[in-house]
Each structure stands twice: as C-alpha cells, then as structure tokens.
Image (cartoon, helix red, strand yellow):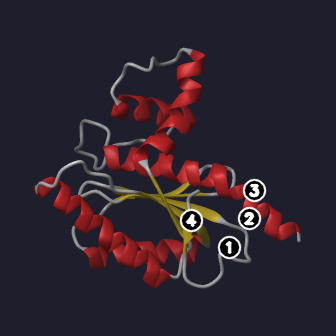
Amino acid sequence: MVAITHIGKSLREEAGLFLGIDPGKKGGLCVLNESGAIVALTVKHETAIETYSWLRTAIEAHRVQMCAIEKPFAKSMNKGVFTYLSEYGEMRMALRLSNLPFIEIHPSKWTRRLHKPLIDSGAITGDEKPKVKSLAAARDLWPDQCWLATERSRVPHDGLVDAALIAEWCRINYKRKIDGAKAS
C-alpha cells in the first residue's frame, strides 16, 4: 500500500485539481482539472526558489487538492542519481512547505497504468522505449498540447510529458476520494 504524505488534512474540502511532478533536473510540473484538461504546465525552473514560487502560485490559483510526485529509484549511485535525488528532495520540501497532500509513485506504476490502454488497442507495442510510450499516451490524452519546452525546441520535453501523465495518474486515482468527500 502507498501512503499519502501530507501535513494537515488528507484531502482538502474544496473541489480538487491535481498536480503531477517529474522531479528530475529536466523535470516538469503539471496541473489538471477534474475532467483531465491541462490548466498549468511548466518545465522545472533553474532554481529551487523559482520552482517553489511557481508551485505556490499554481496551488493557490488552481486550488490543487492532491499531488503525485515520481519516486526515485536507483540501483547504484553516480552523479546523475545524486542530482536526481537532490532535485527530488527539493520538491518534497516545497510540497511540505505548501501543506499539500502528496503521494510518491514509482515510475513503473504510473507508466503501466497509462501505457496499457494504448498497448491493448494496438496503437503501440510493449517493445518501445518508455519515453516513446509516454509521449504516445500524452498525445492520445491531449492531442492539441504542444510538448516543446520552448518555441525553439525541436523535440518534446520528457519532463512535461511525464509530469502530465503523473498528474493524470493522480487524477484517476484520487478523484474518487475527493468526490466521496464532497458527498459526505
């Protein structure tokens, strides 16, 4: 079982929006509304302060209720893993300071859930690389969304794609809980 990490109430009382975070150095942050439309999307900023500022603004402006952040995993330690873990720690601290409930989700869990419909339909095979499957899933969910980080970019930004899919995983799994809290 995965525990929800939060300070204060486990689910906020207002109608919810969902935040997904890919905490890597080239990560992204995405806010979805209850129907799954993207309402805010950004690449991770250069500094922790800039990212925290964007996060606070998004949480307040969009009444974010729940967050899912990709959980790090590593089989060995190297500079890249150390950087990823540092970025992850900064994002966890920002979430705690924001008093936002969040869940840590292993990449295999959210990718399995969001890639499966495309694999089952034959739109993709299980043989593609994870980033190719994620981009296909994101394009299926949000066909009009541009996944480029800047106007000059030529390839889709993995952090934006992953953040949106993590937010969708959060929305699918926690919308029921928020809807149930409203009904009581």
Mark 1, secondary structure of its residue: loop
Q: Is residue 6 left or right of residue 35?
A: left
Mark 2, secondary structure of its residue: helix
Earlier along the polypeptide chain: callout 4 or callout 2? 4
Residue 176: x %, y % from top left:
75, 56
Q: Which mark identifies residue 176?
A: 3
Mark 1 residue type:
Leu
Q: Which mark identifies residue 3?
A: 4
Query: Decide: marks 4, 2 in contact (CB < 8 A)?
Result: no
Residue 6 sits in quarter: bottom right
Query: Decide: marks 3, 2 in contact (CB < 8 A)?
Result: yes
Query: Can you tell which of label 4 and label 2 is closer to the viewer?
Result: 4
Is the residue marked by circle 3 packed among few (<14), some (14-19), or many (20+) residues within 10 Å? few
Query: Where does label 1 land, which residue?
Result: 11
Q: Give how far apart the Cα atoms at labels 1 and 3 are.
A: 11 Å
Q: Give how far apart the Cα atoms at labels 4 and 1 are.
A: 13 Å
Earlier along the polypeptide chain: callout 4 or callout 1? 4
Residue at 53 percent of width and 64 percent of height = 67
Q: Is residue 53 left or right of residue 37?
A: left
Mark 3, secondary structure of its residue: helix
Residue 63: x %, y % from top left:
61, 73
- Which residue is the extreme one toward the right? 184
Mark 3 residue type:
Arg
Q: Which mark identifies residue 178?
A: 2
Is the residue marked by circle 1 packed among few (<14), some (14-19), or many (20+) residues within 10 Å? some
Residue 53 sits in quarter: bottom left
